[in-house]
Amino acid sequence: MTRSGGFALVLVLWVLSLLTIMAGSFALSMRREAGITAGSSSTAQAAAVAESGLAIAELMVMNPDQLQRWHTDGSIYQIDYADSKVRVRLLSETGKVDLNSADQDLLQGLMVHAPVDAELQTKLVNAILDWRDGDDLVRIDGAEKEEYKDAGLSYQPRNKPFQSIEELQLVLGMNEQIFKWIESLVTIHSGQPKVDLAQAAKEVLYVLPGMDTGLVDEYIAARQESAINGLPAPAVPVLSTLGTVSGQTGVSMPVTAVNDATKQEVVMTVITEALLDDGSTATIDALIKKSNSPTGMSPFQVLKWQRNVEVGGSLFIDEKDALLVRQYAEPEFNN
């Protein structure tokens, strides 16, 4: 074979190798593109299913039949579609600790359960109180202008009520771990110094001052059983070891009972999570308020809307199965 013929053969082999590599790369790119397209389609479908869960929740909390109306005490409802399902959890803001209205004892009792040492728990409570009060007088273990300056921070306490839960992250001593723990337990939309135990989720009841966890479990089980069977919710028994509210008649209520639930605005957190047959998921965490809009307008006003932000874990884990009240087939909501 001549030298030029050998060179031509080598060149052909190189060209064939290059074409093989290009073909493989093209095939891989096509597979990736197909996977991304399929994933995007599934994600969009899951998001649509999650949004449908929110729309159904708004419908069901306004059901004129009180026994069919969905509960806002942390109960979970499930709707089954042909190739997907969605779970919906509703949490009344009156069943949480109000950052702007709770007194020091309630905040301290709540913070006792925080995943930090006792010293920081006390400092956080006083820093929260100093943040929301209208003066610059620093509490013992609290924090006002000088303390924030000494900590190297470029801001100071608002000395006004909290405008959002996220504002808690600015309080001196607050960190990401504590904020994630407390985020689902507190609110700024109750307006009451106490917690409405009838609307409180299990997670909140566990961390209120003086609560007997055994009694809480019994009450949650009874409340769940009543909801499953379409019966009125049971009266709230004494769940606290701290005593009862003086001057009340009928069933004794714990000291953490809400003062006047009749004056509450209807504000609730609605968490919806969709799960498709292929495993795709989408989550919506919405804070909504019953609106006084004219007839024809949406009956609810959206105060906050987050997608794919899990607060408290997935609604499809075993722990949440125990909170499932009712399972519906999608055609039940077609009319």
Image: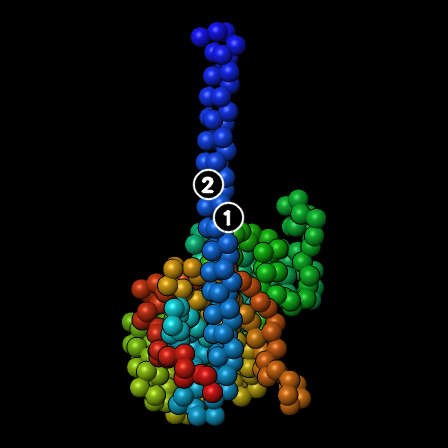
> Is residue 153 positioned above or below 99 on the image?
above
Q: Mark 2: few, some, or many residues within 10 Å (few <14, many ≥20)?
A: few
Q: Residue at x 40, y 88 (%)?
A: 68
The spot of residue 280 in percent (x, y) is 42, 59
Label 1: element kind = helix
Q: Quadrant of the N terminus?
A: top left
Label 2: element kind = helix
Q: Are marks 2 and 1 in contact (CB under 8 Å)?
A: no
Type of the residue with mark 1: Glu
Residue 166 position by quadrant? bottom right
Residue nearest the viewer, comparing 160 with 144: 160
Q: Residue at x 66, y 56 (%)?
A: 144
The spot of residue 309 in percent (x, y) is 50, 60
> Is residue 172 positioned above or below 216 on the image?
above
> Is residue 121 positioned above or below 231 on the image?
above
Q: Which mark is residue 33?
A: 1
Q: Residue at x 66, y 50 (%)?
A: 148
Residue nearest the viewer, comparing 261 with 307: 307
Q: Is residue 281 left or right of residue 289?
A: left
Q: Is residue 152 left or right of residue 50?
A: right
Type of the residue with mark 2: Leu
Q: Which residue is mark 2?
A: 28
